[in-house]
Amino acid sequence: MIELVIDQRRKDLGGFEVGRVLPFHSHRMVGPFIFFDHMGPARFEAGFPRDVDVRPHPHIGLSTVSYLFEGSMTHRDSVGSTEVIRPGEVNWMTAGKGITHSERFEDLRAHGGSMHGIQAWVALPERDEEADPAFSHHGSDDLPTYESPDGKLWARLVAGRAFGVEAKVKTHSPMFYIHWALKAGGQADIGPEYSERAAYVAQGIVEVDGRQIHAGQMAILTPGQGVVFTAVSDAIVMLLGGEPVGERFIEWNFVASSKDRIAQAKSDWRAGRMKLPDADDKEFIPLPPDPPGSANPMS
């Protein structure tokens, strides 16, 4: 039932630590999901430095999916969007042929508080890699929820289609993304409908087929089999997956089916040819040096 367990790798992004799960060296993607960062949990005091903010930076070839359990972020992008995201909402940004955006922690800086959430990237199918960039924000009314009769499972469909319902978030390929909140002793199951599936434990411990999966671990599930989860403690689990979109290369913030397209995006950003957000155009993140082995951006 479990093919592989991936442990998060802690990364300091300059005053804010995340747990990186995807891409993993032996398992790059789960369906169209190509990047998965667990933000926090972290506690901030009012007045913390602006270094924690994510300054304007570019993307191509993907959709970013921001989802919070606690806290808030302000998103600004080059198509004119400014949106504060709060727990239970979705920011879905489609980069397509190119977009820039920033994520600022302005409310937290003013008042202090906790930050806890997930940032995921979904690779676009080849037909949409050069689509016009777009942004959409979805409140909780757009995201179907379910509660079990015993009260030990609460679920929200964040994006895609699963369990016979569909979220109103526009997606580009068959996929699902689900938030489970389980109470100790509670059970939940997922069917075999999609060919690639995974479960990430953001909080607590769950058991699958006699094996415990702890907070900070992603279980890659065996294709074609239904899976039952039992909560050893109160737990938060994110389920994700879908149908594969084919090989993708990833370097820095760029995703593409072609290495040449990534090289072009790097050149465009270095030369200042990608428009910054109108509401946040005074600074940006420079292109980092080419990594070792950059002939293969996925290495």
Image (cartoon, rainbow, N blue to C red):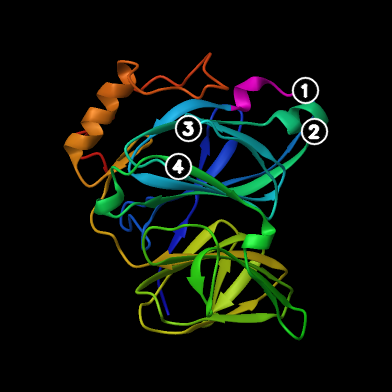
Q: Would you say 123 lies left or right of 103 here?
A: left
Q: Is there CB contact under 8 Å for labels 1 and 2?
A: yes
**Quarter holding the C terminus?**
top left
Which residue in the protein does label 4 denote? 134
| Residue that carries the numbered disc 2 in the rendered image | 112
- The residue that label 3 is drawn on is 79
Q: Earlier in the sequence, mark 2 or mark 4?
A: 2
The picture quadrant where one finds residue 287 is top left
Q: Are marks 4 and 3 in contact (CB under 8 Å)?
A: yes
Q: Earlier in the sequence, mark 3 or mark 2?
A: 3
Numbered disc in front, either 3 or 2: 3
Which mark lies nearer to you, 3 or 1?
3
Q: Tell me the distance, in whole angstroms, between the alpha carbons under discs 4 and 3.
A: 7 Å
Q: Which residues are magenta?
A: 47-53
> Could you give the CA–CA distance between mark 2 and mark 4, rounded to whole angstroms?
31 Å
* Residue 269 position in % (x across, y down): 33, 22
- Circle 4 — which element? strand
Label 3: element kind: loop
Amino acid at dot 3: Val
Amino acid type, callout 4: Ala
Disc 2 packing (10 Å; few <14; some 14–19; many ≥20):
some
Mark 3 and mark 2: Cα distance apart in space: 29 Å
Q: Amino acid at mark 1?
A: Gly
